[in-house]
Image (cartoon, helix red, strand yellow):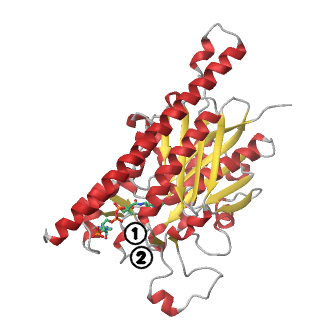
């Protein structure tokens, strides 16, 4: 039987022209550039113009991805549209995009998994490709979060931005593409990130609108804790499932929600920061668009080469999380991914050594995470105590 591999053959991104800086925000709510930069790493974000919406942004990114792949919309078999900010509740954004692209033979569906949506979409698309069912799938992550944000709430409005990123996943005979994946959800934590008033559970009333309940409500600290934990666990899972350690990974593309979250996860994983793509300073948190925007930038900057192993990892509303290990195909695809594989030893011993190598790395990562948790457990009460004393002294 023929083995099919998923291959990213095209990519494209789009962000609206209008830029909203931290200084602009400081004119709108009680915040400062200094607070936003030190607590999140964000300096500016892009905001959709009047008349610009999720589907129109997705259209621009998708057209670029098709062009890079060298195919037309009529070649698409499926569109997977990851978004939590659709133009309408109904019809689905995926069908609107299918029509505007002219993807006449494509199926179309929306995938709602918060900020993890694009990675969920990439893994889903790969299944259709690897079974041989489909040839070309468009996976697009797009958000118009400026529509969903309460612009009077400084806890959330400084974080989010608008944008779109798209890839074409094609069927290939070249080994590589999706190597391993981890999709997860902790629905019990769902109220940490919620738009309470829009949905079938209760009618939307003028009173609810008055209280801004149709906008995003978020418990930032809870998500912060969740994120640092699941990002590390999910990366460890996908890397070890492939029989590799973090040293074998060339680039990590994390969801851009907070630079501090990324830094903490990176430290726990023991990975060099130069191997991590960070662009949150220019876009803020664009939810399902965040990973594809970062992926497109990495590709356009030449940071991804044939044979490279990339981990994409995200977390978000749900609360969900997702990670996948992707091997970039190309003429120079590596034949021997594992160091011990070059040793002149028996296959069984080689496998055993490799398992030991992966297990040692997992144990090391777990120990680092425990140490970091213990440090936090000591530092947090000290920090709160210091803050309390400062408050009482009126400083
Ligand atoms: O894509 C997934 C979606 N969400 C996330 O990933 C969010 C994850 N969480 C975070 O990124 C962080 O928790 C935040 C950036 C949201 C907040 O940072 P933090 O260090 O956890 O701050 P905090 O919530 O503990 O608030 C610290 C202080 C508070 O004041 P008091 O109570 O200490 O006097 C807040 O009221 O900072 C205040 N604060 C602000 N001050 C200036 C909160 N937002 C702002 C602001 N400007 N924009």
* Crowd around label 2: few <14 · some 14–19 · many ≥20 (10 Å): some
State the residue in front, 330 or 285: 285
Q: Quadrant of residue 341?
A: top right
Q: Is mark 2 within 8 Å of ligand 1?
A: no
Identity of the residue furthest to the top in this view: 344
Classify residue 245 as left or right of residue 17: right
Which of 391/318 is in front? 391
SS under mark 1: helix
Q: Is residue 134 above or below residue 285?
A: above
Query: Which residue is disc 2 drawn over?
Result: 150
Residue 330 at x, y percent in the picture:
60, 28
Give how far across and how far down residue 35 sits, in percent.
Answer: 26, 61
The image shows residue 157 at horizontal and vertical percentages of 38, 69
Displayed-image quarter of ligand 1: bottom left
The image shows residue 310, relative to residue 219, as above or below, that is: above
Q: Which residue is drawn at the image coordinates 64% and 7% (left, top)? A: 344
The residue at 22%/61% (across/down) is 386
Looking at the rendered structure, which numbered label has been put on residue 261? none
Q: Quadrant of residue 47?
A: bottom left
Considering the numbered disc 2 on the image, is that residue within a helix, a strand or a loop?
A: loop
Residue labelled 1 has its Cβ within 8 Å of some atom of ligand 1: yes
Q: Which residue is mark 1?
A: 156
Q: Are marks 1 and 2 in contact (CB under 8 Å)?
A: yes
Q: Quadrant of the C terminus?
A: bottom left
Query: Which of 388 and 287 lies nearest the eye of the viewer?
Result: 388
Residue closest to the eye, 353 or 324: 353
Relative height, residue 136 to residue 92 (above, below): above
């Amino acid at each position: 039987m023929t083995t099919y591999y998923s291959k990213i053959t095209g990519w494209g991104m789009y962000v609206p022209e209008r830029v909203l800086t931290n200084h602009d925000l400081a004119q709108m709510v009680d915040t400062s550039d200094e607070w936003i930069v030190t607590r999140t790493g964000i300096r500016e974000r892009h905001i959709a113009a009047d008349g610009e919406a999720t589907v129109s942004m997705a259209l621009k990114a998708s057209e670029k991805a098709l062009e890079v792949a060298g195919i037309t919309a009529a070649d698409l078999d499926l569109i997977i549209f990851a978004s939590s900010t659709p133009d309408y509740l109904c019809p689905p954004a995926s069908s609107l995009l299918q029509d505007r692209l002219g993807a006449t033979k494509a199926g179309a569906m929306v995938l709602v998994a918060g900020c993890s949506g694009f990675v969920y979409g990439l893994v889903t698309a790969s299944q259709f490709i690897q079974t041989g069912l489909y040839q070309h799938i468009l996976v697009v992550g797009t958000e118009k979060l400026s529509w969903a944000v309460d612009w009077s709430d400084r806890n959330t409005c400084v974080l989010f931005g608008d944008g779109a990123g798209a890839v074409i996943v094609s069927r290939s005979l070249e080994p590589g593409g999706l190597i391993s994946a981890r999709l997860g959800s902790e629905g019990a934590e769902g109220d940490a990130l919620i738009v309470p008033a829009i949905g079938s559970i209760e009618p939307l009333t003028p009173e609810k609108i008055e209280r801004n309940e149709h906008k995003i409500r978020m418990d930032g600290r809870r998500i912060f804790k969740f994120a640092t934990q699941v990002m590390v666990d999910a990366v460890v899972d996908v890397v070890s499932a492939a029989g590799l350690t973090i040293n074998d990974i060339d680039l990590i593309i994390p969801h851009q929600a907070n630079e501090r979250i990324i830094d903490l996860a990176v430290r726990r994983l023991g990975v060099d920061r130069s191997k991590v793509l960070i662009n949150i300073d220019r876009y803020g948190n664009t939810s399902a668009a965040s990973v594809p925007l970062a992926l497109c930038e990495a590709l356009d900057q030449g940071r991804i080469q044939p044979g490279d192993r990339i981990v994409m990892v995200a977390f978000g509303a749900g609360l969900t999380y997702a990670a996948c290990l992707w091997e970039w195909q190309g003429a120079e695809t590596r034949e021997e991914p594992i160091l011990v594989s070059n040793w002149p030893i028996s296959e069984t011993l080689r496998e055993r050594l490799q398992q030991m190598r992966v297990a040692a790395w997992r144990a090391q990562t777990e120990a680092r995470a425990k140490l970091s948790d213990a440090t936090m457990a000591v530092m947090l009460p000290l920090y709160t105590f210091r803050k309390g004393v400062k408050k009482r002294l009126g400083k």
